[in-house]
Amino acid sequence: MSAISPIVIIVGTNRPNSMSRRVAEYYQKLLAQSNTSSTILDLVDLPHDFTFTALYGNSGKNDAFNTLKSHIDGAEKFIFIVPEYNGSYPGVLKAFIDGLPYPNSFTNKKAALVGLSSNMHGAIVALSHMNDIFSYLGMNTLALRVKLAQIQSHFVDNEITNPLYKELLEIQAEQIIRF
C-alpha cells in the first residue's frame, strides 16, 4: 500500500504577499487540524520567463518550473485558492496549467475551489471558468465552491473572522479529505 500524497494547495496568483497566500496558509491549518498533510504551491515561485522557457517546445527544460510541476505529478488532490482578476481568474494560473502535460496532469484527480474577491461576488465567475477547464481536463471538482467576497474585511491577523466563511471552509476541507 502506498503512502497518501499531501494535498497540494495552489495559490492562484503570482502576486507577492497576496491575500491568496494567506488564505492558503489558513486552509493548511484547517487540514492540519484533521491530521491531513498538505503543501503549498505558490505561483509567486514561477520563473518570471516561464511562458518562454518552460512551455511548448521548451517543455521540460526549465528546472524551476519542473520543480513546481513535480508537486502536481505526485498529488491526487488539490485546493485552488483563486483570486478574481478582471472578472475571472489570473492569467498566470492559466499559463501554469497550460504548461503542464496534457491530458494527464489532472485526469481523474480531485479538487476543491476557493474564490476570493474584494467585491461582493466572491470570484463566482472565476470559479465557474476554473470548473469548466478542470472538467475538460478530466479532473473531478467538489460541488461546494467556497466564495469569499470582500475578503479583506473578513481576514484579520491570519484568521477568517466571518463565521459563515469559517464554516464553509471547514466543511469543504472535510469534503476534500474524504473525496
Image (cartoon, grey):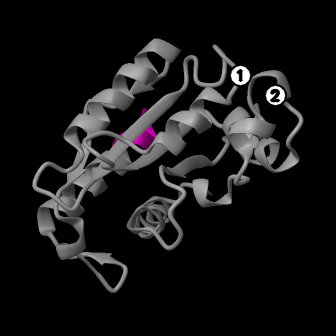
Residue 116, image x and y in percent?
28, 55
Residue 151, image x and y in percent?
23, 66
The N terminus sits in image quarter = top right
Say what amino acid the circle numbered 1 marks: Pro
Please say if 93 is above or below 28: above
Please report whichever mark, 2 or 1, sits nearer to the chain's N-terminal start: 2
Check if mark 2's residue and mark 1's residue have beta carbons within 8 Å.
yes
Answer with left or right where residue 158 lies relative to residue 3: left
* Mark 2 and mark 1: Cα distance apart in space: 8 Å
Residue 95, image x and y in percent?
58, 35
Mark 1 surroundings: few (<14), some (14-19) or many (≥20) residues within 10 A: some
Q: Residue shown at 67%/42% (left/top)?
A: 5
The residue wearing badge 2 is: 59
Q: Does the magenta stretch include residue 178?
A: yes
Residue 144, image x and y in percent?
25, 37
The residue wearing badge 1 is: 101
Chief SS of the magenta region: helix
Q: Does the magenta stretch include residue 115?
A: no
Give the magenta part as a residue range.
175-179
Q: What element carries label 2?
A: loop
